Image (cartoon, helix red, strand yellow):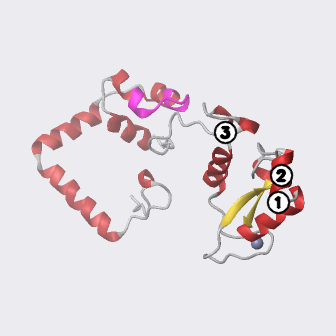
Amino acid sequence: MTPRKRSYRKGPGYVLTEAIRQKMRESSRKRWQDKRQRDHLSKLRTITLPVEKIISLYKSGLSLRKIAPRFGVNYDTIWRRLKSEGVLIRQKGTTGHHWGKDHHKWKGSTAGYTALHTRLNRRFGKPKSCDVCGTSDPSKVYDWANLTGHYDDPKDFKRMCRKCHINFDFVKNGSRRDRKRKGVKRG
Ligand SMILES: [Zn+2]
C-alpha cells in the first residue's frame, strides 16, 4: 500500500505529518494487542452489508448517521465500508446544509443588510483589499459595496475600502440626507 499523505477525514488542507502517523501506528498496535478490540474489528470485517444500497442511499443525500441504524451497525462501520469502496465521503455535518435558494432563511432580494453581507462573506470571505484603489493595507476597513442595487446578485458587489465605499456611495446616491429622503438602502 502506498502511504497516504493526507487524511481526507479532516478536510483537504489537513496534512498527515510523520508524528501523527507514528501516533496512529502506535494506537493501531494497541488495538491489535487488545483481544477484545481485535475480535470486535474482525467481526466488523465479516458483517455483510448491502453496499450498493448503502451507496445509493448515501448519494441520495442521507447522512451516514441516518443510514447506519437501518442496518444495525455503527456510523463508523459504514464510513469505513464506503471509504474502501472509494465513495467520496462528504465533510462531517454538512448533510442537510442548504445554501442559497434552498436555505430556509433565504430571503432573496429582500435579504436584510446583515444577512446579505454574511452571505457574501461566507461565499467569498471577508474583503481584505479594495477593488477601486487597489490597497490591501491590513489596518484599513473593507466592505462589500453594492454597485447597482441588485442586492440579490453576488456579482453586483465589489470589495472596497471604507474610504472608496463612502466616496462611491456619495457619487451614486448623494449625501446621507439625500439618501434618507430617497429611501436608498445601505449596501
Ligand atoms: Zn479603496
Location of residue 84 (image quadrant): top left
The answer to whether one can see residue 147 in this image is: no
- Confirm or deny contact between disc 1 and disc 2 (CB under 8 A): yes
- Confirm or deny contact between disc 3 and disc 2 (CB under 8 A): no
Question: If you read the primary sequence from the N terminus, does the residue marked by circle 1 or circle 2 appear first?
Answer: 1
The answer to whether one can see residue 95 in this image is: yes
Residue 100's tag is 3
Residue 169's tag is 1
Residue behind mark 2: 179
State how far apart marks 3 and 2 are (Cα). 29 Å
Which of the image's four quarters has the N terminus? bottom left
User: At x 89% / y 62%, what residue is drawn?
Assistant: 171
Q: Nearer the viewer, mark 1 or mark 2?
A: 2
State how far apart marks 1 and 2 are (Cα). 9 Å
Query: Which amino acid type corresponds to the residue marked 1 in the rendered image?
Result: Asp
Q: Nearer the viewer, mark 1 or mark 3?
A: 1
* Above or below 18: residue 68: above
* Above or below 116: residue 1: below
Category of crowding for the residue at label 2, using alpha-carbon neighbours closer than 10 angstroms: few (below 14), some (14–19), many (at least 20): some
Q: Observer-nearest residue: 53 or 181?
A: 181
User: How many badges with numbers are in the image?
Assistant: 3
- Confirm or deny contact between disc 1 and disc 3 (CB under 8 A): no
Residue 36 location (% of width, % of height): 12, 40
Q: Observer-nearest residue: 6 or 45?
A: 6
Q: Tell me where the magenta segment starts and ends, as one range.
A: 57-67
Query: Which amino acid type corresponds to the residue marked 2 in the rendered image?
Result: Arg
